[in-house]
Image: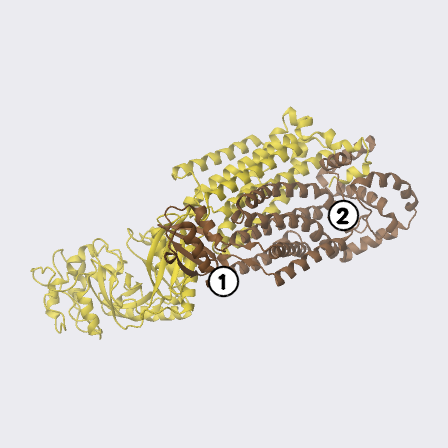
Amino acid sequence: MAPPKNAPKPGRTLLALFAIMVVMAGLAVWQGQTKPKLGLDLAGGTTVTLTAKTANGKNPPADQMNQAVKIMTKRVNGLGVSDAEVAKQGSNNIVVNVPGEGQGRVVNLIGTTAKLQFRQVFAVADGKPSSGAAPVPSSSPTKGTGEKKDGGKSPSPSASASPSGGASPSASSTPRGRAVSGALAAPTPKPSGSSAASPAPSASSPLGQPSGQPAAPAQDYPGVTDKAVISQFEALNCYSGDRRAPGSNDPNRKFVAACDQDEESGQAAKYILGPVRVLGENVSSASAMPPNAQQGQASWSVSLKFDGTGARQFGEVTTAASQAYQQNPSSPQAQVAIVLDGQVVSAPSIREGAITGGTASIDGPPDSFNQQYATDLANVLKYGALPLEFKQSSIDEVSSTLGSDQLTGGLIAGAIGLGLVVLYCLFYYRGLGLVAVSSLVVASVITYEAVVILGEGMGFRLSLPHIIGLIVSIGITADSFIVYFERLRDELRAGRKLRSSVENAWKRARRTILVADAVTFLAALVLYFLAVGGVAGFAFAMGLTTLIDVIVVFFFTKPLVALLARTNFFGRGHPMSGLDPRRLHKAQDTSAPAARTTSQEA
Amino acid sequence: MGTRAAISRIYRGEISADIVGRPKIWYTISGLLLALSIAGLLVQGLNFGVEFKGGSVFTFKAPSASIEQVRSAVGDGGAHQVIVQKAGGDWRVTTESLSSDRVTEVKTSVSKELTVPADKVSTQVVGASWGGEIQKKAWQALLVFMILIIAYLSVAFEWRMAVAAVVALVHDLVITAGIYAWSGFEVTPATLLGFLTILGYSLYDAVVVFDMIKEVTKPLGPTSRTTYSEAANQALSSTLVRSLNTSLVAILPVGAILFIGTTLFGAGTLKDLSLALFVGMIVGTYSSICVATPLLVQFKEREPKYKQIRENIARREQSTKRAAKTKVKAGAGASAASAEDAPSDDDAGERADQDVSDVRSTVTVRKVVQSGSRQQPKRGSRQQRRGGK
């Protein structure tokens, strides 16, 4: 906040400030929001009761519940500064109160277990069950058929029934990571042994394969030792119902069958995944990254950083996948699936060699992997997985916890208080009091606008404490005028002309104001970043008003005083102007000795 | 007449009092307050609200009841922290942790007053929504903040000022907490937010005063005729009007909210927050003037530079000027009567009065020299003043 250069044209500064205020108002209207959003205590919100699910139906251990409360608190507060509340109720419920109605997104986010796993892919197919029920395209099967050696349990119709090849044209544009596109198309020519390099034609075939030409399914699942999983995989339908295949979220299972998280371009793949290679616990931080067109990335992504163990493990799994890719670019084992809550978010194949830097990124189709999704995902991953699974047992809209009477009371009281402040300013500072009062008005207007805009932009919601905090800080804001006015009067007492006093006093007051405001701002900043819940919201309001204070003093109060100093009323020191040198000087020609008066100059 | 003159003096910014000169008085007052507060915190303890301790939740259906009826029905059952919410078709009332007997009483009261069958009132225990995690983080934040603030003030001013400001800050927080402990007012998240505001306010106030002290004491050198204490006191006096005005302006809205909050609504967010603010602001103003500044002065007077000044002045006092000054004494003393309530208990003892006035004119002179670019107008004004006199 660099001070303006001694503003030789106070009028311009004032105009600029008003322009900013008009723009802010315009922004608020454009956002379609002209009232501040209110918090839980004033406007009510959504309350969700989450009940812990345990395998044996017993109450979960208390420490796991506490851990879950902790994580949920972080998650819900990671969304913005809306002061949500999370509390344990009874022994197996967690109640989450979120301000605002219809908070579906928040509700889903809170309850997500967020178990993140990295597993190597062992087989991929389109997500339709490979049962006879599926339409069997009669067109001649591709080379793949010949390789159907020991289909195991899979019935022969499945050969054509898992039409992954048919999907390939669109799959080539598939968004679940470029790698996946190859993979989706790839399973066709799978050789029986994963180690054997596939014949050249098959490797190049996938993308070129004409649509409607169903590829042969991978009949054998090299390396997959769990027959139950294979049959589960074949029966799995990823197009309807729950995409969470039973058991897919269990990190202890060696092999699991899993679906894609979303359909994309009308398709959902299913996977057989190998053992967990990296767990979400080993992610040390996660953040959402905007699309980077230069690197050919069309969607938002989430970048992950692993801790030491995670980095090593991730290096190992990518090495293995990279080797598989070297041997056969279309091998499913070249892919590493990122599994979130039992669903595959993406399964890129590792082409560029092992990734040992301890970072990874998750991306997906631009239509579903948007900013909100990426932010939520990063948020959920950052704060860790819930130790328990929860189901929502109720979602209700709740009323405010305070009667509207408290709000009205607070506002009326605040208005009375500010009214008294105005009276006092006018009484004490006379004409200057008008400057103070109009500064307060400007500060209030900017604060209001900022709150409205930020309510939309970062989910800032006013609770009653915030409102009182804002009223009070507007009162405290008046301090910077007082500092300035007192300096100004000191200068006048010293016998200086008004015009030069305005500038001199400003130079001295400016530093005081900045240093003092910096302290408050520092307080707000620390509390905002380090504290959670209501404290962060309040700190936010505190920092906001401090900034506004600086803006108002620099761009309104000072220029206004400079402008008024040019008028006759103030410039000549009219008795009602508050800058009457005779009044300020009175001491000299009356009782007090000079020594005393001059002593006040400092 | 006296008050009129006093107001007029205040208007002209002409009040001064020797605050720095008698630190012991202030330390005694503060020490007593602190001791009382700490005793209160230890003996009585803070009365934490539901948000911190958890409590009991009552859920029942009473479609025709209003929020006030529900609140009073539960309140009549003996609960005093009552948070009423309407969740879907149900009322959800959170109270402090109640024993099973009290739970029954509340149930009876609810069923009687709202005509709800007692067995349709379900109760559960609810955990703290402002649980340990939030509190832990809040403490961490406070600690980090203290460290940063000391660092910042050490750079912007100097470490002594930083320490003095932070001591005053802790002083304010402890005393405000002590008042909460003794009064038994409930500590809710709103109260905590009030404390946080005090934190900002207390420092702000101290910084404004220190900035002035820094400015006034900057020109002090071996040949100065003012000690650090006197200069600081002088700075304090000249910011006193500002301090009072600021406090008044800040406290007026809070006072109004507190008044409305307590008289109209009884317990509630309004009262919780405004009481903490009200107390904290008064204590904050007091501490920046009467604790932080004297403390700073004591720190500074130990510095060799300022010790030296003090000795030099003492030596000069012995000189012949003494006689001349005594003559002035009568005039200065008389005029000082109303504003300056008592003579400073300076080393110089009985000469205190005229020393102070002498010293003050010295300060002014010094300031003129210091102000460099502003020398011209100042000098003009001094002549003017001399002419006037």
Quadrant of residue B388 within the rendered picture: top right
| The N terminus of chain A: image quadrant | top right
Q: Is residue A281 left or right of residue A479?
A: left
Above-or-below relation of A600 to A431: below
Q: Which residue is mark 1?
A: B132
Residues indicated by labels 1 and 2 sit on the same polypeptide chain? yes
Badge 1 sits on which subunit?
A: B
Q: Which amino acid lies under the numbered mark 1 shown in the image of this protein?
A: Gly
Q: Is residue B376 visible?
A: no
Secondary structure found at label 1: helix
Cβ–Cβ under 8 Å for marks 1 and 2: no
Quadrant of residue B147 within the rendered picture: bottom right
- Residue A522 place in picture, x, y as percent: 56, 51
Above-or-below relation of A75 to A6: below
Q: Is residue B133 left or right of residue B278?
A: left
Question: What colour do you see for chain B?
Answer: brown
Residue B327: mark: none
Quadrant of residue B39 within the rendered picture: bottom right
Question: What colour do you see for chain A?
Answer: yellow
Secondary structure found at label 2: helix
Badge 2 sits on which subunit?
A: B
- Residue A278 place in picture, x, y as percent: 34, 69
Given residues A316 and B245, the one toward you in this image is: B245
Which residue appears at 58% of the width and 41% of the height?
B256
| The C terminus of chain A: image quadrant | top right
- Residue A216 place in picture, x, y as percent: 13, 64
Query: Residue most toward the front?
Result: B112
Q: Which amino acid lies under the numbered mark 2 shown in the image of this protein?
A: Ala
Query: Residue most toward the top?
Result: A568
Cα separation, mark 1 vs mark 2, equals 47 Å
Q: Which residue is mark 2?
A: B231
